[in-house]
Amino acid sequence: MDERILGMTPRTVIVLLLIIMVIMFVILLVMIHQMNVISRKYTAFMQGRDGEALEKMIHTRLKEIDQLKQVSRKLINEQRSMQTILSGCVSKYALVKYDAFEEMAGKLSYAVALLDNNGNGIVLNSIHSREGCFTYAKEIVRGESYIPLSEEEKQALSRAKTAEEEIKEMIHGTDKDSRKSSNSLDRAYKLLD
C-alpha cells in the first residue's frame, strides 16, 4: 500500500525536507557570519566607552559643527561685504602711449582708463606739446562714454575691459561685424592665457 502525503511519496517528502533543512542551515551560517561582522564593528566603534561617554562625545561634536556653521556664515557675510566694497574700487586699467603731434617724438602723450568691476570710472588723456601739457578727463559709465573719445582713449578703454566682458558682448550681439567679433574672441583668448 502506497501512502501518499500531499500527493507525494514518503521518500520524496523526506528528500524535500532534507533539502529545506540544508537551505535553512546555510541561511543560519550566513546570518551567524553577518552577526559576527556587526558585533566586531560595534565593538570597534564603542572601544570600551559606555553609552554616556558616547552621548557626550556626540553632543560635543554637534556643538562644534554648530560653531563651524556660525563661523562659516560670518565669513560668507564678510566676503560679500568685501566684494561690494571692492566692486567700486579701480580693478581694471590700461595705458596707451602715443605721439600727439608729428613734430613731437618719444610718445610723451598718453591715455589711461581706470575702471571698477562694473565698468564705471574715467579715461584720462594727457596731451604733451611744446607749449605745455593738457589733461582731459572723461567719465565712463558701464563701459561707455557720453563724450566722444579719441582713438587712443578708445584703445585704453577697450584694453581695460576683461575677457569675460568681451565674451558677454559677443554673446549678446554688441559686436555686429563678424571680423570685429573674431578679433574680440582672439583678444579674449589671449587675455585668458
Image (cartoon, rainbow, N blue to C red):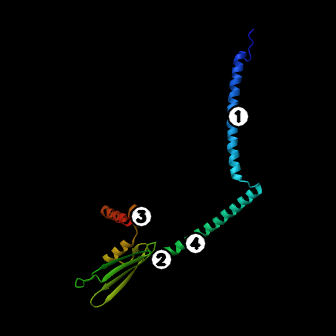
Chain-order first, disc 4 or disc 2? 4
The three-letter amino acid code for the residue at tag 1 is Leu
Residue drawn 69% across and 18% down?
12
In the rendered image, the quadrant that contains the C terminus is bottom left
Q: Which residue is mark 1?
A: 28
The three-letter amino acid code for the residue at tag 4 is Glu
Secondary element under disc 1, as helix, strand or loop, is helix
**Residue 17 vertical position relative to residue 61 in the rendered view, above or below:** above
Of labels 1 and 4, the one closer to you: 1
Extreme-bottom residue of the structure: 131
Disc number placed over residue 89 in the picture, else none = 2
Chain-order first, disc 4 or disc 3? 4
- Separation of disc 2 and disc 1 at Cα? 74 Å
Q: For residue 11, which quarter of the picture? A: top right
For disc 2, the neighbor class at 10 Å (few under 14, some 14 to 19, many from 20) is some
Residue drawn 75% across and 12% down?
3
Q: Position of residue 45 (x, y in %)?
A: 69, 52
Q: Which residue is mark 4?
A: 78
Residue drawn 33% across and 81% down?
110
Q: Position of residue 145 (x, y in %)?
A: 39, 76
Chain-order first, disc 2 or disc 3? 2
Of labels 1 and 3, the one closer to you: 1
Chain-order first, disc 1 or disc 3? 1
Q: Nearer the viewer, residue 50 or 8?
A: 50
Q: Are marks 1 and 4 in contact (CB under 8 Å)?
A: no
Going by the image, does 83 lie left or right of 9?
left
Q: Are marks 4 and 2 in contact (CB under 8 Å)?
A: no
**Residue 146 vertical position relative to residue 41 in the rendered view, above or below:** below
- Separation of disc 1 and disc 3 at Cα? 67 Å
- Separation of disc 2 and disc 3 at Cα? 22 Å
